[in-house]
Image (spheres, rainbow, N blue to C red):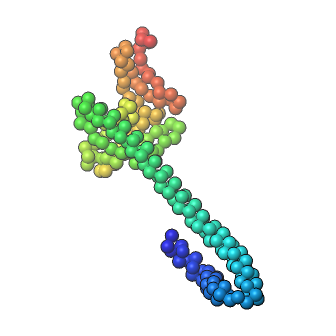
Amino acid sequence: MIKFTQKIIYQFKEYFILLLLVLISLLFISNSENPKAKRIQAFALANFAVVQNVTSSFVSIFVKDESIEELKKQNALIMLQLEKSRKAVKENQELRSLLGLKDTSKYTLIAANVVSKLVNKFQGNFIIDRGYEHGLVKGMPVITSAGLAGIIMDVEKNYSVARTLYNTSLNVAVTIPRTNVNGILNFNGRDLIIKNISTTYD
């Protein structure tokens, strides 16, 4: 606000000097009893009022514009904080789910982040930021709090490529809990299906 005021004063210094001189002149005229001086005083006061009104309106436009810009910045910051809060809540929920999963799992779990997704109609793949340096090997399952997400197919030092369940090249051996029947889970390009099931089972 101080910089803005200094900028206004610098840009309109001639007008401020003029107003100052007018005020000084009015001061001297006001002490005179001469009728002509009184008329000049009335005329000067009227014009001074007009100039002051126009100047105030002009300056207020910039002040309002500055206030609007400041409000826009504050609104953007609030929206950013809100989005960060939503993301933090989501990550917290996911972490709680993963902690619960870790408590019930008898296997050593390695936490990883998905850094890229390579998805088309028939081939779903994604890259995670963990590799053989972290203990990953080809064929390991990739799981989330919702269950199996895919299988690791290629492993490098610090990253790995995994196939999602929605990949026509992926076949996963599964067991149907209700009947304890084994089968092969596969994606046919539209749906996940279980094949190689004996016809004696429903």
In percent of width and height, residue 15 lies at 64, 82
* 42 relative to 81, above or below: below
* 149 relative to 88, above or below: above
In the foreground, 17 or 171: 17
Please give the name of the residue rendered at 49% of the width and 42% of the height, measured from the top-left corner.
119
Location of residue 21 (image quadrant) = bottom right
In the foreground, 109 or 194: 109
Please give the name of the residue rendered at 46% of the width and 48% of the height, measured from the top-left corner.
82
Please give the name of the residue rendered at 31% of the width and 47% of the height, measured from the top-left corner.
130
In percent of width and height, residue 169 lies at 44, 34
Q: Going by the image, does 94 lie left or right of 76?
A: left
Q: Can residue 18 be seen from the camera position used here?
A: no
* 144 relative to 67, above or below: above
In the foreground, 33 or 120: 33
In percent of width and height, residue 184 lies at 40, 24
* 26 relative to 104, above or below: below
Please give the name of the residue rendered at 41% of the width and 38% of the height, measured from the top-left corner.
163
Q: Going by the image, does 79 lie left or right of 57?
A: left
Q: Can residue 126 be seen from the camera position used here?
A: yes
